[in-house]
Amino acid sequence: MASLLDEKDPKSPTITIQEMQLGVWRVKVVSDTVFGLQKQWDDARSALPLYWRLMTDIFNASPALFTIFIACQLWQGIEDSILMHFSNQFLRNIEAGVGQGKVNSRKILSDIVTRLVCTVFFAFIRWYSGKVLELLKTRVTRYFELVLMKAKLGLDMPTSQEAGSKQGVSAQQAWDALQNIFKFGTDLIRIASHILLIARISRWSGGPVYTLLCISQPLFSAFNRRDLWDKVCFGFVNNTFYLRMKSLEKLASGAFRQDIISGGLGSWIADEFYKSHLHLVKIPEGHPYQLYSESSVLQDILSKILGDSPVVRFFHFCALQAIKDPAAFSVASIAILQQSSTSLKYSITMVMRTSQRFRSSVTSVKSIYASTGVINSMVVGHVPYPRVDEKSEDADGSKGMGFELKNVSFSYPGTRSITPALKNISLIIKPGQLVVIVGANGSGKSTLIRILSRLYDPSSGQILIDGLPSSSHRIDDLHAATTLLSQDNLLYPLSLGENIGLGYPECVNDKEMIRDAAEKGGALEVVQKLKDGMDTELDPTVETFELGLYGNKTHPLYEEMEKMPKSINVSGGEKQRIVAARSFMRFNSGKVKFVAVDEPSSALDAEGELRLFENLLAVREGKTTVFVTHRFGHLTKHANIIICMKEGNILEMGSHAELLQKKGEYANLYEIQAGAFSDTTSKRKEHFKPQVLG
Ligand SMILES: Nc1ncnc2c1ncn2[C@@H]1O[C@H](COP(=O)(O)OP(=O)(O)OP(=O)(O)O)[C@@H](O)[C@H]1O
C-alpha cells in the first residue's frame, strides 16, 4: 500500500493507492475512501459552472433538438418503472379475479390496452430519441469542431508550439462529456424511480420492511462487487518473460526479415520464445479488467450466501405475511417486486460505472474550454503597417521594410537545447536592401528569418521595424506585408490552382493571375503535365471502407476501389516550384514589403534555381529581400549585405568584396563553391588525396 498527497491542494485528503499483481500486470488502484467520495462530490460541484456553459452552448447551437434530447433522457429514467407499474396492475387484477372466482374482463381488457399503448409509445420514443441523438451528435460535434478549429487557427507560432506539446482535445470529447453527464443523470433517475415503485408496490404487499429488503439486496450486491471499470487505476506489464516474448515476436515480424535470414537467427528466436513461454504457463492470461473481477472459490461461496441472504429473508417474510394476513399478500406484486429489485441492482451497478465517466467528463469539458481561451504569448500592437500617416522616408514602407535588431537572443519554446538558437544578434537592414545569409547547418539562419517575419518574438533584445518596436505594429498587417518562401512550405491538400492562388486569398479564383504566378515560379510545366491541370487535387481527401474483399484483385469491387482519386506524385523540385508560384501570387496583393526566402531551391535543378532567383530579383522593387542559401553564387553580386552565421552568432557581415578580403569563414565557403568549377582548388584536392596504404 502506498500513500500519495495531492500536491496541488494542501487541504486535499490522502489518496490511498493499492498495488496488486494481476497475471503479468502490475496494477495500481486508487481506493475509494469516504474522503475520496467527498472530493469527487466537491469536484462535481465546482464543475457546475462548466456544465452550465456546455449546456448553454449546446442549447444555443440547437435549442429544439437539445430540449427533445433532455426530455428523452428523463423519459428513459422512468420508463422501466412505469412499465412495471402497469404490469403490476394487470397481474393484480388477474390475481384478484382468480381469487374471487370471477374475472373482470373489462378491467383486464383496459389493462391490456393500456399496456399495449404504453409499449407502442415507448418503442416510438426509443426510435425517436435514437434519431434525435444522431442529429444532435452531428450538430454538437460540428459546432465544437468549428469552435476548436477557430481557436487553433488563432494561435501564434510560440503558443501553438506550446499547445502542441500538450494533449489536444477533440469535438468528440464534448459529445462524450454531454452523453456521460446525461447517462449519469438518467441512471440516478432510474434508481429513484425503482425505489419509488418498490415503495409503492410494497404498500399493498409487505409495507416498509418489504421495501427495505428489496432495496438492501441490490445495494448489498452492488457494493460487494469487484470491478475495475469504476476505479481510477494504472497498470503496466511487470513480467520480464512476457516482455521478452513480445520483443521476440517483434523480431520475428517482417521488418527484421533480412537480418534474421542473413544472420541465421530463426531457430534462436524460436528457442528463446519457448523458454520464456515455459515461465508463463502458470500465469493467467487476460486483461486486468477481467482478472480483477475474478474471485476465489471461497469468496464466491461467501458472496453467494451473503448475497442471497436478503432474498431468503425476503421469502421468509413473505410467507409470514401470507399466513398473518392473506388478503394483503399478492404473488403478482412479489414477482414485480423481485423484478424491480433486479432492475435496481442493475441500475446501481450502472451508476457506479457511469459515475467514473461522469467525473472524467469534467476534465474533458475543462480542457475543451481551456483550449478555446488560450491567450497568445506574442504581443499584438495597434500601429498599422505601413504607417500611412508618417512623413519619414523610412516609415511608409514604400522602399520596403526596415529592420534594426538590438542584442536579440532567441530560444525555441520548450526546446531541449541548452544553447539559444540566436545569441546577441545586432544588425541593421535598411528598406529595400538585398541581404544574403549564409552559414553552416544549425547556425540560426532560418531562425533569424522567422524572427524577422515575426513568427516568433525574441527571448531578449529588441527588434525595430521601420523605427518602431515590432510589438507596436498590428501583427496581421506585418504578416500581410511579408512573404516567406521557405523549404518548410508545404503543399495544401487542395487543388493545384488553390495551392498557388492562396498566396493571395482574395484572388484565389483569378485564373489569369494564378497562371502568371505559376509561370514566374516555374510551376507551369508541372500544371501542363496533369490531365486536370489547375483543377488537379494534389492530395485528395478520400475516406473509404471495405469488408470481405481480402485484397482480392479480381473482385469487381476491387476495380471500384481502384477508381478512387489518388494522391499525385510531385517531386521535391516540383513542390518547390508550386510553393514559389504561391509566393509570386502573393506579390499581387501589392502589400508585400519584405520577402524572406529561406533555401527554397534545394531540390531545384540548376536552371530552375537560376530562373527562380532572377524572377525574385525582378520583383524586388519596393521590397526588402533576405535570402538564406547554401548556394549563393547567383546572389552575391546583387547583395547589399552578406551575413555569415555560426552557432547562433553573426560571425562576419559586409559586402562580398569586403568579406572576401577578410579571408574568413565566408571567403572559405565561397572558395569551396567557386573552386568546384575551377582549378583553384587543386591544392585542396591534393590535401584530400587518398593515402596509399603499405
Ligand atoms: N522549431 C524548432 N524548435 C526547436 N528548435 C529548433 C527549431 N527549429 C530550429 N531549431 C534549432 O535552432 C537551431 C538553429 O536552427 P536553424 O534552423 O535556424 O538553423 P539553420 O542555420 O537554418 O540550419 P540549416 O542550414 O540546416 O537550415 C538549431 O540548433 C535547431 O536545432
Image (cartoon, rainbow, N blue to C red):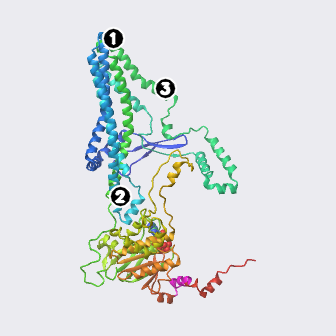
Instruction: Report whether the residue tagged 3 is closer than 8 Å to ligand 1.
Output: no
Q: Which residues are magenta?
A: 663-673
Residue highlighted by disc 2: 149
**Magenta segment includes 46:** no
User: How many other residues sit within 10 Å of disc 2, few (<14), some (14-19) or many (≥20)?
Assistant: some
Mainly helix, strand or loop, the magenta region? helix
Work out whether mark 3 precedes mark 1 in sequence or the reverse, and give the earlier one.
3
Question: In which quadrant will I find the C terminus?
Answer: bottom right
| Along the viewing direction, whichever of 651 and 271 lies nearer the viewer | 271
Q: Is residue 10 visible?
A: no
Q: Is disc 3 placed on a helix, strand or loop?
A: helix
- Looking at mark 2, is its residue's CB closer than 8 Å to ligand 1? no
- In this view of the protein, which residue sits in the foreground, 82 or 611? 611
Cα separation, mark 3 vs mark 1, equals 32 Å
User: Where residue 232 appears, x then y in whole percent?
Assistant: 42, 43
Left/right placement of residue 550 relative to residue 462 reads right
**Image check: 55 left or right of 487?**
left
Q: Within the image, what quadrant is residue 422 found in? A: bottom left
Q: Is residue 48 above or below residue 322?
A: below
Q: What amino acid is labelled 1 in the image? A: Ile
